[in-house]
Amino acid sequence: MRRSFASFMAVITCIAATSAVIESSPAAADSTKCAGNADALGVARTVEIDTSGGPGFGFEHYKAHDFLGQKEVILTFDDGPLPGHTRTVLAALAQHCTRATFFPVGKLAVGYPEVLREVIKAGHTVGAHTFSHIDLGKAAPDKAKDEIERGFSAVKRASGAGTAPFFRYPYLRDSADSLKHLGGRNIAIFSTDVDSFDFKVQAPENIVKTVLSKLEKRGKGIVLMHDIQPSTAKALPMLLKELKAKGYKIVHMKAKDEIKTLAEFDALIEKDIKGLPAAGSEKTTSSVVKTVPNN
Ligand SMILES: [Zn+2]
């Protein structure tokens, strides 16, 4: 009895000590957690988003919810996954023990599910960005619905789990019908506060300059980048270092509930996914293929 009480007290003391460290010095807690990088950005705050009714975020288009404090930044990456560049982006984020939100394209998710699973495994949030990146501002309502739903079904099937009901319009172009559809499906919409224009600005140092000068003006914001751009992948270590040096804090977004995909669109994806096992049910290759003695 005494022994269990002692171990109980040890646990309580440990919890108290941990929360004291986090409360008094979040930066110190982050860097101790991030091996090998004393100047890691870490994650200053995690927010959970209730997507009921399809709220919009990002002041470039949707101004209802201003949830970031001064110097708070959200990193977002569109258009992936692509093996080379997405992995470079993941490595840069891991170097800082920080988290981002990815908006992959359904077609690419189905093409590179292993990369998408690496994104999920690293603890990032994954939403969707249509199936084939068409301009929904110009699409007929049925086509727009198909692109949105097939996009989510593809990302969910490829990632295996944990897809957030978070959506970003290609080219940031919405339409009344698709907004109504997203609202009815309880999918949140993300525009941006700080557009990096990384698809136009090709020199990595210019991407860093663009993001930092826009952030300085706004003081905070959701930053839009692309994990398929080689210059973005190159710019990211520099950008993360500068964000830390200038006192910005990373906020990580999570969804209150996962996306509930529609069965008819899930069925369409099965044709493209070619027998990919569900995440977690994969057999290791060494358990499937073994070297045996020659005969
Ligand atoms: Zn895009």
Image (spheres, helix red, strand yellow):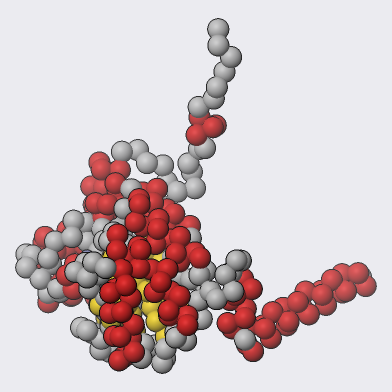
> Height in image: 82 above or below 55?
above
Q: Which quarter of the picture shows residue 54? A: bottom left
Query: Where, quadrant-wise, is the C terminus in this rendering?
Result: top right
Task: Report whether residue 264 is seen.
Answer: yes
In the rendered image, the quadrant that contains the N terminus is: bottom right
Residue 55 image position (x, y, % from top left): 29, 80
**Quarter of the image where one finds residue 165:** bottom left
Residue at (10% x, 71% y) in the render: 137
Establish if 55 lies above or below 136. below
Whole-percent x, y for residue 69 in the image: 42, 91
Image label count = 0
Looking at the picture, does residue 168 appear above or below residue 64? above
Q: Is residue 131 left or right of residue 51?
A: left
Question: Where on the image, by quarter, is ligand 1?
Answer: bottom left
Residue 257 in sight from this viewpoint: no
Looking at this view, name the residue that lies furthest to the right. Answer: 2
Spot occupied by residue 109 in the image (x, y as percentages of width and height): 31, 52
At a point 21% along the width and 56% down the height, the residue shown is 131
Residue at 47% in and 80% down: 244
Name the quadrant containing residue 71. Answer: bottom left
Work out which residue is located at the far top of the displayed protein and give it.
295
The residue positioned 55% from the left and 76% from the top of the image is: 39
Q: Position of residue 8 (x, y in %)?
A: 81, 74
Of residue 275 and residue 198, the one placed in the foreground of this image is 198
Between 166 and 207, the one lying in front of the other is 207
